[in-house]
Image (cartoon, rainbow, N blue to C red):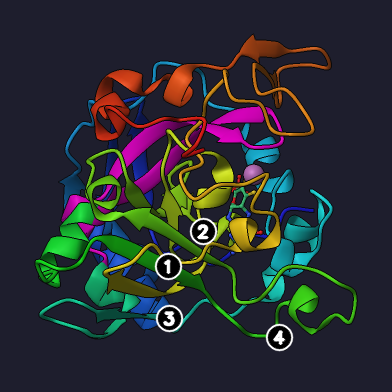
Amino acid sequence: MLIRTRPRFAYSEVTPKSAWLSRRALIAGMAGVAAAGLAGAAEAAKLAATPSRYSTDAKPTPYDYVTTYNNFYEFGFDKGDPAKYAGALTTDPWSVRIDGACGKPGTYALEDLVKPERLEERIYRHRCVEAWSMVIPWIGFPLGDLLRRVEPDPGAKYVAFETLLRPAEMPAQRSLLPSLHWPYVEGLRLDEATHPLTILAVGLYGETLPNQNGAPIRLVVPWKYGFKGIKSIVRISLVTDQPPTTWKQQAGNEYGFYANVNPNVDHPRWSQATERVIGGGLFAKRDTEMFNGYAEEVGSLYAGMDLRKYF
Ligand SMILES: Nc1nc2c(c(=O)[nH]1)N[C@H]1C(S)=C(S)[C@@H](COP(=O)(O)O)O[C@H]1N2
Ligand SMILES: [Mo]
C-alpha cells in the first residue's frame, strides 16, 4: 500500500523541464489550514519555477518503484519497510536548526526555509551504492540558496546534516538489534554543498515528498551514492572540519566521505561498473557513469585528487 501524506504542494502541471506550484496551497498546507484547500488553491497564483537546465533527459522511474523501493533504515532494513512504516512519522510541524560557523544561526520553521518561487523540478539520476539506480523527478531548491541566506563564516569549510531522532516514531531507533548509530548524519564540503546541482528536495513527481523518501525535506546530491542524500533533516551545521558520516562510521573501509559515483573504484565486496535499473525489467542493467553522468558539471571540484584514496 502506498502511504501518501496530505499534499503540501499542489501540482498544476508537469513538463519535463518545469513545474508549476501553487503558493497558496503550499502555505495553507504548511500552516495546517486545510480549509483554505481547494478554493484557495484554485485562485492561487501559479508560480512558474525556473525551467531547470540540470535535469537529465532519461525517463523517470515509475512512481511506485520510487516510493516502495527505499532505503530509510530508521524504518527497517528491507526495501519495503519505509513504505510500510514511515507513514507514522509526524512531519508537520517541522523545523530545521541551522547553526555553527554562520552569521544567522537559528531554528527555522520549514515554511520559512522553503521559498515556493525557488522550487523547481530536477529530474536526476539516483545511484545507490548497492549498484542499483533510478531516475527521480524531484521538486526542490538549491541548498546553496539556503546556505547563502545564513551567511557562512569564512572559516566554514564543510556542512554537516542530521536526521530526526525520534525513537517513538522510528522503529529501528528503539530496536535492541544492532543497527546504525542514530541519528543518521551526513556531510559535504562547502563547495559541494553550494554547487548548483545540490538540492534540498521537498517533493517528487510533483507532490509533497512521501515520508519514505525523506519528508518533509531531504538532501539530493546526484553525482554521489544515494547514502549521501540524508532524509528528514532537522539540523544543518556549518563546520570547519570534515564531519562524521553514518556509513563511514559504520564501515570506513567500504563507505568514504566523498562517495562520488565512480565505476572504476569498486566497493570492496562488489563491482560498481554496472547498475541494476530499478523498474526497467528483471535484467535491466546499464554501465555506471563517472560522477553518475555529471562529470562535466562537477569534475573540477575534484581536480588533482586521488579518487581511490578519497572514495
Ligand atoms: N536518514 C536516512 N537517510 C538516508 C538513508 C537512511 O537509511 N536514513 N538511506 C540512504 C540511502 S542508502 C539511499 S540510496 C537514499 C534512498 O533515497 P530514496 O528512498 O528516496 O530513493 O536515501 C539515503 N538517505
Ligand atoms: Mo543507497
Residue beneath the point at 69% across and 61% down: 250
Whether the residues at callouts 4 and 3 have beta carbons within 8 Å, the answer is no
Residue type at the position of mark 2: Ile
Please name the predominant secondary structure of the magenta segment in the image.
strand
Residue type at the position of mark 1: Phe
Side of 105 relative to 169 (left or right) = left
Q: Is residue 54 visible?
A: no
Q: Is residue 276 visible?
A: yes
Of labels 2 and 4, earlier in sequence is 4
In the rendered view, tell whether residue 52 sits above or below residue 111.
above
**In-front residue for pair 10/292:** 292
What residue is pinned by disc 4?
Answer: 167
Is residue 234 part of the magenta span, yes or no?
A: no
Q: Which label sits on residue 94?
A: 3
Crowd rating for badge 4 (residues with CA inside 10 Å; few <14, some 14–19, many 20+): some
Distance (Cα) linking label 4 and label 1: 18 Å
Residue beneath the point at 71% across and 18% down: 280
What residue is pinned by disc 1?
Answer: 161
Side of 162 relative to 143 (left or right) = right
Q: Nearer the viewer, mark 4 or mark 3?
A: 4
Rendered image quadrant of residue 305: top left
Crowd rating for badge 2 (residues with CA inside 10 Å; few <14, some 14–19, many 20+): many
Q: Ligand 2 is found in which quarter of the picture?
A: top right
In the rendered view, tell whether residue 87 sits above or below residue 65.
below
Distance (Cα) linking label 1 and label 3: 15 Å
Distance (Cα) linking label 2 and label 3: 16 Å
What residue is pinned by disc 2?
Answer: 230
Residue type at the position of mark 3: Trp
Of labels 4 and 3, earlier in sequence is 3
Mark 4 secondary-structure assignment: loop
